[in-house]
Amino acid sequence: MRYAALGSGKRLRPLLTYATGVLLQAPLARLDAPAAAAELIHAYSLIHDDLPAMDDDDLRRGRPTCHVAFGEATAILAGDALQALAFDHLAHDAALDVDADTRLAMLCTLATACGAEGMAGGQALDLDATGGDLDVPALEHLHALKTGALIRACVRMGALAAAADAATLHALDDYAAAFGLAFQIRDDLLDVEGATATLGKTAGKDSRQGKPTFPTLLGVDGARRRLHEVTTLALQALAPFDARADLLRELAQHAAARAR
């Protein structure tokens, strides 16, 4: 569990929770539990995504994947335990000084992001699409679940920590949805253009496995254009907010331009 959760990584998902809380002036200590829970869920998902029955990868964050280092059975159990730990932390952390309804809303938000309407459902669609054909709307829907659902949950939990109103939640959800799609398109481009040593994971694996990606459907130039479009949508969603949203703006721009 420590190997998967505490190794190198971008920590982008908890950063989104903190940046949303900063925008809405939530106390930083109140954001620790949802941010940590999101990263624990992400770590669990990477363990399971890398398993031979899933994406079947031997390298993650520049070192052997969890099942390579510890065996497949131990890796499955470590992922299961990290998922449980995320919910335990979110349910019990004393520094999360919100009322019971808000804590329950955070728990429900994270649970939905993990399940059939989120990461698990998206992974099922991804496995089913391997070696087949998808159109662009279907691919975007797949990744709205597999990648985007947890990103949306991170932003929403940061907003819930600040008791955001419905209009604010809606605008931030638009931001997070566009952010998640931009992140995935950039990921697909990096799989084509990046090097294993830089990425910390196996480059070119998607094409070798026959996975539909944005570059395969749109071409590299078309994928870059779509990346620019959705990044612009993310930034436009932040138009109602002042300079306190600059960290969210910077994170969106980073997601679209990152090298790993």
Image (cartoon, grey):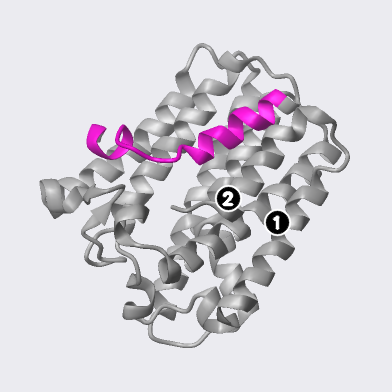
The type of residue carrying mark 2 is Ala
Up-down: is 100 above or below 224?
A: above
Look at the image and tell me in which quarter the N terminus lies.
Answer: top left
Which residue in the structure is indicated by mark 2?
A: 255
Q: Position of residue 56 (x, y in %)?
A: 25, 65
Q: Say which mark, if any, is on residue 212.
A: none
Rendering quarter of residue 53:
bottom left
The type of residue carrying mark 1 is Thr
Q: Position of residue 59 (x, y in %)?
A: 24, 55
Up-down: is 21 above or below 51?
A: above
Left or right placement of residue 71 versus residue 192 in this view: left
Up-down: is 52 above or below 129?
A: above
Q: Considering the numbered disc 1 on the image, is that residue within a helix, a strand or a loop?
A: helix
Q: Position of residue 46 (x, y in %)?
A: 35, 51
Left or right placement of residue 228 versus residue 84 in this view: right
What is the spatial separation of the Cα atoms under label 1 and label 2, in whole angstroms? 9 Å
Q: Nearer the viewer, residue 48 or 235?
A: 235
How busy is the neighbourhood of tag 1: few (under 14 within 10 Å), some, or many (20 plus)? many
Which residues fall within the magenta stretch? Answer: 2-22
Which residue in the structure is indicated by mark 1?
A: 231
Cβ–Cβ under 8 Å for marks 1 and 2:
yes
Q: Assign the magenta stretch its main secondary structure.
A: helix
**Residue at x 33%, y 37% (from the top left corner):** 8
How busy is the neighbourhood of tag 2: few (under 14 within 10 Å), some, or many (20 plus)? many
The disc, 1 or 2, on the residue closer to the chain's N-terminal end is 1
Q: Considering the numbered disc 2 on the image, is that residue within a helix, a strand or a loop?
A: helix
